[in-house]
Image (spheres, grey):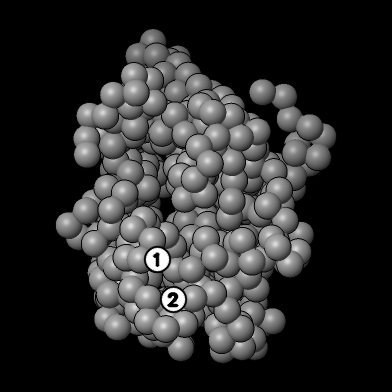
Amino acid sequence: MLLTDQQRMMRDSLREFMDEEIAPDLPAADRQPLSKDEAIDYMQTMAEMDVGPYAEEPVEDPVTRTIVSEEVARVWPSLQVTMGMSLPVTVLDIFSERTREAYAEEYDNDEMVGAFAITEPDGGSDTKVPNTVAREDGDEYVIDGEKTWVSNAPIADVVLVVAWDAAAERRDMFLVDEKTSGFESRSLDKLGWKGSPTGQLFFEDCRVPQENKLSHAVVAAIGDGRLDPEETALLPGDGSGDPLNALFASMRNGMAAISVGIMQAAYEAALDYATDREVFEKPIGQHQLVQEKLFDIRAGLETGRLLTRHTAQQIAHGDPEARLLSSLSKGWVCETAVDVASDAMQVYGANGLSTDYPLERYYRDARTMTIPDGTTEIQKLVVGYELTDLQAYT
């Protein structure tokens, strides 16, 4: 896919910025989850490139956002996850006055962290009928439930929570803020994305204004001109007419874009090592089986990149197949990233297992990609349903 001059300039500038400003902190910065202050510092730094939730002129085009995700994840996937999950911060002004006033100072100073709370302990990748419930009580909703494997949970100020709207008898999203509604969190450790904080969230009698229901807030904000539906990353198109499906499609393809970034890093590392490392007085890249590994690595990278960017284009256009493509890209590209990282590690031999080299981190991060935002198995069922119109799960 040919990039525009603007996209190419963005990619090259961001790559140089990441190599000079962020890469020197690694791998030390990825050994434990970022604190809230550290996450804010990094996101403020990234805003210099108009990237992340604090950007003055955020990237709106889905294809360009995909390129940004690739370049950030090429250096540090954990940072891209932390920034991407803070998206609710960028639309704070469409929600209730109560929440906006509570965080006015932090919002003005770019000192907020956001999160999406979707997965539940008893639900896994099934988000159609969440156990977390929002019940109307006067001009408020009362939210009760539990979420798990939530990126940014331990450091979040505001969380968009998928809950069952009892009155409307359908799922919706509700913005819950820590100051006025309150929620409890517990940190979780994991295989990859070590720098990105992850945890559980507990909601007990959490009261939020009616204006904090996403469907209500979007309609009101579009009506009074605060929100342009064509210029927000919160409501990409997916051809389904369901805003949550559209949001999930964008998030799934975002996971694929991060995987492309990991594959790019693994490819560059493997190629450099294969041409520099000498055994029996010649570079290991001169051996046939190493060249086969490089072939597989490059093929996975290029195919994954094309599928991810094509999917981003279809999401931007509201194509009817965007939902199918987003699950296809999430499932296939993330699994391929594991294979690519594994092959790159094999090129390194024993050194690939060492924490002195980045390959083990690439592999751990790639393996982590296959589960968040819907496991590979769920993506296959979504694609199967879209292809056949036959439901394999309830």
In the image, residue 264 lies at what x, y percent? 52, 35
Labelled disc at residue 161: 1
Answer whether residue 229 is visible to the viewer in this image: yes
Q: Quadrant of residue 2?
A: top right
Give whichever of 389, 357 is nearer the camera. Answer: 389
Residue tagged 2: 176
> Residue 172, how many percent across, how many down?
42, 59
Residues at badges 1 and 2 in contact (C-beta under 8 Å)? yes
Secondary structure, mark 2, is strand
Circle 1 packing at 10 Å, graded few (<14), some (14-19), many (20+), is many
Q: Residue at x 82, y 34 (%)?
A: 5
- Residue drawn 67% across and 66% down? 221
> Which amino acid is tagged 1?
Val
Q: Residue at x 28, y 47 (%)?
A: 125
- Residue in the image at 29% along x and 41% along y: 375
From this viewpoint, which residue is outermost toward the right?
A: 5
Mark 1–mark 2 Cα distance, whole angstroms, equals: 7 Å
In the drawing, what numbered circle is on residue 349? none
Residue 61 image point, x, y percent: 69, 43
80 up-or-down from 351: above or below: below
Above or below residue 387? Residue 76 is: below
**Image height of 302 relative to 68, above or below:** above
Q: Quadrant of the N terminus?
A: top right
Write down the quadrant of residue 324 in the picture.
top left
Q: Residues within 10 Å of mark 2 (few under 14, many from 20)?
A: many
